[in-house]
Amino acid sequence: MSVADRGTDRVPLPLGTRREAVAQVWLLGLVGVQIACQLAQLVPQLGTARPAFRVAAFGFSLAAVAFASGRASRHPSRPWLAAAALLMGVQFFSPTTNSPLSGLATIVLAAAIAGPILWVGRLRVTPTLLRRTLLTIWGFQSLSAAAGVLQALYPGQFMPQAGGAYDNEFSDGLKLVLADGSIIFRPMGLSDTPGGGAVAGLTAYILGLGFLCNSRSGVMRTLAVGGVAAGMFCMVLCQVRVTIVLAVIMTAVLAVALTAARRYGDLIWLAALVPVTVATSGGYALTVGGEATLRRLETLVEENPNSVYYQNRGQFLEWTFREGMEDYPFGAGLGRWGMMNLYFGDANAAPDAKPLWVEIQWTAWLFDGGAPLMVAYAGAVLAACVATLRVALRCPDRRVAGWGAVLTAYNLGVCAVTFSYVPFIGQMGLEFWLLNAAVAAAARTVAPRAGAA
């Protein structure tokens, strides 16, 4: 064999290395597509392609379901999600489904959102890849929260153009009057949605706590504290009170999970740095936001929490379980609410298939499959919560166990969101199933190695 021939020889990668490379392509690929599509929506010249950017990540998830190779492992949520899919399939044939196209679109979107439970389990997710995925998500959301901070500190300089649905004569309720008299949209972060900085801030906050507890690098811990501070600043200044409540819930759940796992060193870091960081950044946000921001936050402690919730979202929950359950015990048909109705619905549908209004997740489940779908999907979410807690308490790999504790807190926060918003119809739902599937897959990857030791 000549030297030239030897130079062109390719040494095949070991099977394990190849599987890890494939897993990285799919996991980081989905996260990268999500980030790219969100940033593309900030470019005014691409405004006509906005719908395509909104659905691209869901298309990637469906492609992964079809093409990601490997032997699938069962996640505890899979049987529940299979039941939910069956119920929605039956609902498709309901005479009250708005149109075949809107019904099919609803099923396809639901499949894309829950898709990671199917395809991530086929991949070899190592602790390193899990951390890299979480780092990518946290890094982008922290940058988005930091952008929200700049939008508040330098009014008019860093604010992107609001999406068409928000930039109109009804947008005054989405604006803030700062302490210096400036009037701005609620910080958007790296999104085109007023108040979007609060959503980015919540993710930056909880994953920042994860890196604070799970990192041994002083630099990484410093960056984590910065993400937590930026996240809290945005949550306070955006005046999205539910995110602040969720941050409190998530922090408490994380502390309990760390205590149950006997990770007392991580608990000390949490107790030592978080109160100071939150008080400093939140207090500074109140200084910038002025009296209006302070008055809105005071309602969380001055008024009865049940009364505050009922006035904002509780009435929708009450309607769902009283009138709604009586009217639609087995569903109202598919494609009758939200973007699936807006994009694919039939405006000339029969009266009993006309559009319906949804404000919280429980109403969405009721319309799409009635009480059986509410039980099935809630069961899937609860199974995911139990699975991450089991990882936190039993996984032999300390890194993966630590992220299991963080995801337990994150999961319960998303559970709480179902009573205020509709997380399982968009990016939040996709991210929920992606992270849960990734943690479970990483725990399975390290289990054989621990057994061999």
Image: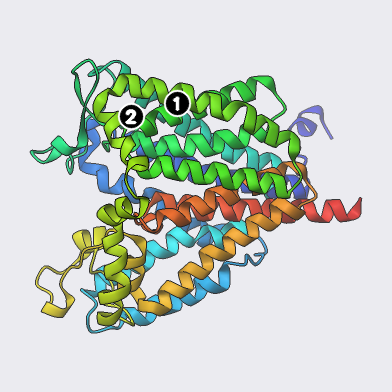
Q: Residue at x 21, y 74 (%)?
A: 99
Q: Residue furthest right?
A: 453
Residue 333 visible in the picture: no
Residue 61, given in percent of the width and then of the height, sits at 47, 55
Task: Determine the secondary structure under disc 2.
Answer: helix
Image location of residue 178, percent across then percent down? 24, 22
Choose top left, top right, bottom left or bottom right for residue 353.
bottom left
- Left or right: residue 372 versus residue 223 is left
Dividing the picture into quadrants, the one containing residue 156 is top left
Q: Which residue does the image show at 32% across and 64% down from the upper left?
A: 317
Establish if 400 lies above or below 284.
below
In the picture provided, is 365 more to the left or to the right than 119?
Answer: left
Asked whether disc 2 touches disc 1, contact meaning CB atoms under 8 Å apart, the reply is no
Q: Is residue 419 left or right of residue 347?
A: right
Q: Crowdedness of circle 1 by 10 Å Cα count: few (<14), some, many (20+)?
A: many
Residue drawn 19% across the image and 19% down it: 182
Percent coordinates x, y for residue 206 in the rendering: 53, 39
Type of the residue with mark 2:
Leu
Of badges 2 and 1, the one in the foreground is 2
Query: Does residue 113 lie above or below 237 as drawn?
Result: below
- Residue located beneath label 2 in the image: 237
Query: Residue 105, image x and y in percent?
Result: 31, 65
- Viewer-nearest residue: 23 or 82: 82
Q: How is the image coloured?
A: rainbow
Residue closer to the observer: 307 or 270: 307
Above or below residue 83? Residue 120 is: above
Residue at image mark 1:
230
Image quarter of the N terminus: top right
* Count of residue discs: 2
Q: Amino acid at mark 1?
A: Ala
Query: Camera-side residue: 142 or 12?
Result: 142
Instruction: Mark yes or no: residue 327 visible.
Output: yes
